[in-house]
Amino acid sequence: MDTDASVHNNPLLQLDYEPAFASLGDDYYDLVAAAPFPEHRLRFRGDGVLRLLGLDPATVGEEHFIEAFGRFAGRGPFLAMRYHGYQFGEYNPYLGDGRGFLYGQVRGLDGELYDFGTKGSGTTPYSRGGDGRLTLKGGVREVLASEALHHLGVRTSRSLSLIETGEALWRGDEPSPTRSAVLVRTSRSHVRFGTFERLHHFKRKDLIQKLLDYVIAVYYPHYGAEPERYALFYRELVGRTAELAAQWMAVGFTHAVLNTDNMSITAESFDYGPYAFIDRFDPGFTAAYFDHYGRYSYGNQPLVCRINLEALQLPLSMVIPIADLEAGLAIFDTHYAAHYTARMLAKLGFGALGPVLGPELVKATLNYLEAAQAGYHGFFQALAASFDRSWQSDQGAIPAPVVGAPEAFELWRESYFRALASLSDSELLRVGERLNRHNPTTVLLRPAIEAVWAAIDQNDDWQPFYDLIGRLRKPYAIA
Ligand code: AMP
Ligand code: MG
């Protein structure tokens, strides 16, 4: 049992927890307990997140993590959040936190409120016959995804701890029995589009309004008591979600399960299951084996985000005029295009290129990548490695970054040359640096994850996992 002394000395338990979501009342959650586990081994600690929370990692020991985020049976109660959602287009009213809960909320040094959410902490009223557990491999994969995305500049949840818990789990999609774990992640919010959808299902306009006021007060506080704040909130959510989709697309990330219960009301990326980074540039690439129609393919993500934002209009229309919602959604395409173009131009070595040259170069690049069936990341790495300022005055000197598709290459080369030719001398000097600053040399491709997992699975060797995390944290040749 935990002694009083250890609880009092544990910096993780002494954080200033703010019961913000809890104060909304129990229409929004069920009180639940955590499962007891036979073992607790800390496998990952998010020291960067600790610093954000104002803690010095040197003062937080392994035993503190285990006590706070592994051995939490008997503490609490914790909050299993209630939500529904559209899963692969079908409305599912039987969702909710089925293997996790809201552990608590803490304000970061940046002034933002962070949820601590668990995954694999035991069953809840929403487990629907599931075991409430997380496989260790699933936990390892989520830690890797969140570390990779964060350091690529994608707005994402972060992993705070991964504790192996010593149970044998049975899963259809992993060789079983397989090992168990409990993850704690920080997220800007675990309030999902599906949280609102559930309240609409029960026709609870009052609860939608109350939740909306909470969301705006905590996550969109700059709107204050502004009379138009509901419409402004939705419009900003549309803009933020468009930006997130652009971030995923530019870094080559396929989330794989963009159901409305996995869409955050703060437009932060979270909940990493069968995700994958693309290897070749293929808009049709589908990461989840159960996504038979490619609904959540890499290339569909912007459209799916827009569709999910549109679905959210139904619950929000109980309190926000539909004309305001439509006007809000209307900014999606231009926001997406602007963010995506800016990110892709940075990967090509450019800042703003103007309304014609920029989009034209991005289009030519995608055409070339698709025609050559080229490795997405290898293309940009090769471009960064070979770039030479002399290209500005000699189109023929620009080499093909990848083999194949000679016609598409010529069109791309012309476009790249035109873009270079438009630069001033001082702008030209920045291209090489930009190429190295925006194109990762380490990419979290599936074989890298499988290699890390094989070492853990076969030899309980965690070093490759830590080494990979180290590389993901410094993804660029230039810091
Ligand atoms: P996810 O695919 O992780 O977003 O989960 C979808 C829904 O299934 C959520 O309501 C989860 O809480 C629930 N769920 C997933 N895995 C389990 C499990 N092993 N036990 C209980 N509920 C689960
Ligand atoms: Mg989920």
Image (cartoon, grey):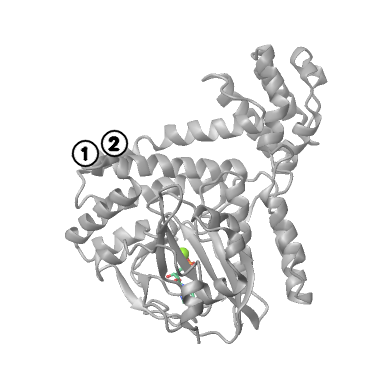
Label 2 or label 1, whichever lies nearer to me, is: 1
Residue at disc 1, secondary structure: loop
Q: Residue at x 43, y 74 (%)?
A: 98
Residues packed near mark 2 inside 10 Å, few (<14), some (14 to 19) or many (20 plus): few
Circle 1: residue type: Glu
Residue nearest the viewer, comparing 273 with 88: 273
Residue nearest the viewer, comparing 432 with 34: 34
Question: What residue would you read off at disc 1?
Answer: 228
Residue nearest the viewer, comparing 61 with 138: 61
Residues packed near mark 1 inside 10 Å, few (<14), some (14 to 19) or many (20 plus): few
From the top left corner, tell me how far across and down residue 328 is, in percent: 31, 38
Q: Is residue 253 visible?
A: no
The tag on residue 419 is none
Using residue 178 as the reference point, say whether residue 12 is left or right of it: left
As drawn, 356 above or below 229: above
Circle 2: residue type: Ala
Q: Residue at x 64, y 34 (%)?
A: 366
